[in-house]
Image: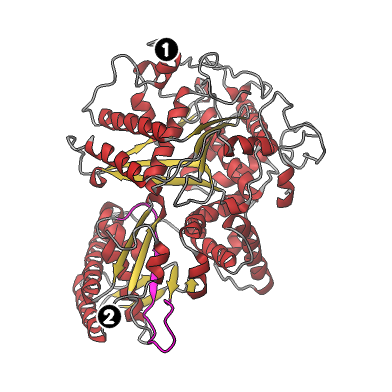
Amino acid sequence: MSRFEGNPTAALLARPSGAVAPGELEEARAQLVAGVADAAAGLAPGTHLEIGLPQLRRARYRPELVAEPEGAFTWKPAFVRRSLGIATLRACVGGRYRAPAEAVGPVADLAVEEWRRTGWRAFHWEPWLAGLGAGGRAAVLADAVTWATPLWSALDWAAVGPVAELGRPDDRWPVPGPGDVHLRSRSEVRVLPPVAAGAPSSPSVLLSVAGGRPGDGWHDELAFLALVAGVASAARSVPARVVGLWPESGALRVAEVDGHALIGAVDRVVDTVAVLVDASTARMATPA
Amino acid sequence: MAPRGARGQRGGVPRTTEATGGGAVGADVAASGAPEWGGPTGPLAGTALLDRLRMTGRARPTVDPAFVADLRAYLDEGLTDVVVGPDRLVITRDRLTQVLLCPSHRSPDRCPTHVIPARPAAHREAPGRSFNLGLACGALVGALFRQIVATGAVADPMGDALDALGLDGYQTPLVAWVEGLDAAERSALRAEVERQAEGLVARWPSFDPSWLPRTDQSARAPLAGGSVELRSRVDFAVGRPDRSSASVALVDVVTGARRPEHREARHFDALVETLRGHAPPFATATYLARTGELDVDPVDHELLATAARRTLSGIRQVLGVEAPAADGTSCAVCRTLLVRPAVVVAVGAPTPVATGRPESAGAPDPLGAVATFPEEVAA
């Protein structure tokens, strides 16, 4: 049982006990490049693979879905709830609103207004939301509130807010070598734990929110977020801890990140690439 | 669309005009000092409805991790002798309800949450799914309920609901089915959707945002090492989860007639919420959009223990390792009627969407005369 059982705020704010040494990150990076090159050898030229948490999870828990062809993208509330939910939380943490249900409407309206005024799409969904009728718009807002509320109520924002970065840009890293394989990691909250004056800075802690419940590979999945953050930026240290929150099942998991955890994530990426390459090959071999 | 600030008035005043097809619901609600919508003998509305949900008459239970652990252990231990296949067994309240009803009370035309007997003329198939007016009404009113909670107003009930459902790929066949109805069926459906939406706007209270109102909340609780998973989805939840005392209320919105199994369905919701969050809800309720009634059960250990027993029995029956109780005691309808076997659903009976009855009138339901629970709020 984790020492943070039931307390994600403590898991975010407790100073990590260790950190990944530069040599451990280099070792993980080397294994990642070699493993992906090997697994992606059969990838057809021109095929792009993006590996994120959804791909990691699907390949392990629902491999039958990997082989299904992807349909054309169309916006729907499920694709908006996270970004609108995070913007809503940001507005609440900033003290402008008391809770997600109060913030979501004004935040969505402001985003649409900004897009109309400047043409800049901060969230990408602004034109789609602007074109919806009252019923569709309400469905989008309701979905975002339902997404944001568990995170709003799970954390002590008075403590976390001042040191938290909500919805920072995804970490992306193109894996060097043959094949067009990109890694992408996305976390909802990044915290730089407070340190005493004069003490060395501490590695960051990430929080990831997911649907459903944790599978048996949750540790590698959380470590994957740290791995991608580490290889994507030479300037930042590897996050020392990743907290996973599965509100639907009330589950909290914490992965302390060390060299061993990074290698577990590397293995998981390589396995996922292999599954995706197999599926891609099978799709191409199937007559239309 | 009515401004959010106007929502506090909703439910506390009568409509000033009769709602008409396609007209605004809510825009015609004006502030006054008049009695609550529905009158003193009508269904509760506004703050009275809110109080009914908030004040159950019992102290809110304290969070008791040991009791929750006992519940989980009881369920896990009751499944140690069963073998679940390679795929996890998912138990929803609908699945549980169906397996626990005795055969004479099961019907393919009955959906436990939207129980309206299907009219054969309106019952057509879509690929992999079948629809009827009752199911359509449930989905449409469900979408409007979310809209009312999110924005406080509905301008065009049918249009708004179809608009919302059209965004959900799963509901696309239902939307197409509704749009393919003939004029008479569609008109009947529209009338019922507008009537229920009007009632929702007029009666449903405004919830302070700090109480964290949210819709369509789903919960899961894995059992037996994850090979069995309980899943629930409630239409509305309110209250900030607390570590010391129960602080969340769950509400399911039902568009059909009251059924005995609704009560057990909401108890199942309470059980899953307890196992998921380690804290029980303090109340679990069913809002009957058709009549405006709110059935509320305060949650206590006894309710949760009974729900756990029924859930375990249901799982074992789904797995085929336990036979249904021979005396019908596992069937909610039989236990309510105290007669076994009891009523067979009258397929072809008038559907509520076509009745146009006043909201306070009794539903044309074969069980309506006997299927009330004594502890439920009086209409």
Chain for numbered disc 2? A
Q: Quadrant of residue A71?
A: bottom left
Residues B59 and A219: in front is: B59
Query: Which residues lie in the magenta part?
Result: A192-214
Which residue is painted at 62% across and 26% down in the image? B291
Residue A181 vs residue B359: left or right?
left
For the C terminus of chain B, the quadrant is: top right
Q: Main secondary structure of the magenta part?
A: loop
Q: Amino acid at mark 2?
A: Val
* Residue highlighted by disc 2: A20
Asked if the residue at tag 1 contacts the one at tag 2, i.e. Cβ–Cβ closer than 8 Å, the answer is no
Q: Amino acid at mark 1?
A: Leu
Q: Is residue B129 visible?
A: no
Q: Secondary structure at mark 1?
A: loop
User: Quadrant of residue A281 in the image?
Assistant: bottom left
Residue at 54% from the left image edge and 44% from the top image edge? B165
Nearer-the-camera pick, B190 or A18 = A18
Residue at 34%, 25% in the rendered image: B100
Q: Is B69 on the left-hand or right-hand side of B80?
A: right
Q: Residue at x 59, y 26 (%)?
A: B377
Image mark for residue B338: 1
Residue B251 drawn at (x, y percent): 53, 38
Label 2 secondary element: loop
Q: Is residue B122 visible?
A: yes
- Residue B213 versus residue B216: which sits nearer the camera? B213
